[in-house]
Image (cartoon, rainbow, N blue to C red):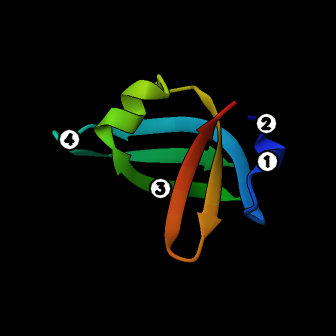
Amino acid sequence: MSIQAINVRNQFKGKVREIIRGDVVSEVDVETPWGIVTSVITTRSVDELKLVVGSDVVALVKSTEVSIAKL
């Protein structure tokens, strides 16, 4: 699936700056040209996306939810 297949208007390209891992959920800070975007996602998703500090990602913002897509 390409990133164009996702219907979210607010997309911010950036790099993972920090990951604070928890047993169930993790906090992922993404540094974008417009500032830091923070997402709380499952730790399983962090592992499945193979997110590490420096990963290129897109933060997808809809309402109060922030999703992450790895580039």
Q: Badge 1, how many Cα within 10 Å: few under 14, some, many 20+?
A: few
Is residue 39 placed above or below 55 in the rendered structure? below
| For discs 3 and 4, the disc positioned in front in the rendered view | 4
| For discs 3 and 1, the disc positioned in front in the rendered view | 1
Q: Which residue in the structure is indicated by mark 3?
A: 38
Q: Badge 2, how many Cα within 10 Å: few under 14, some, many 20+?
A: few
Q: Badge 4, how many Cα within 10 Å: few under 14, some, many 20+?
A: few
- Residue 63: x and y in percent read 57, 77
> Which element carries disc 3, helix, strand or loop?
strand
Lateral position of residue 19 relative to residue 49, left or right: left
Amino acid type, residue under disc 4 in the picture? Gly
| For discs 1 and 4, the disc positioned in front in the rendered view | 1
Is residue 36 placed above or below 62 in the rendered structure? above
Residue at 42%, 37% in the rendered image? 18
Q: Are marks 2 and 1 in contact (CB under 8 Å)?
A: yes
Q: Are marks 3 and 4 in contact (CB under 8 Å)?
A: no
Q: Which residue in the structure is indicated by mark 1?
A: 5
Q: Earlier in the sequence, mark 1 or mark 4?
A: 1
Q: Earlier in the sequence, mark 2 or mark 4?
A: 2
| For discs 3 and 2, the disc positioned in front in the rendered view | 2
Q: Disc number at residue 2?
A: 2
Q: Which residue in the structure is indicated by mark 4?
A: 22
> Which element carries disc 4, helix, strand or loop?
loop
> Which element carries disc 2, helix, strand or loop?
loop
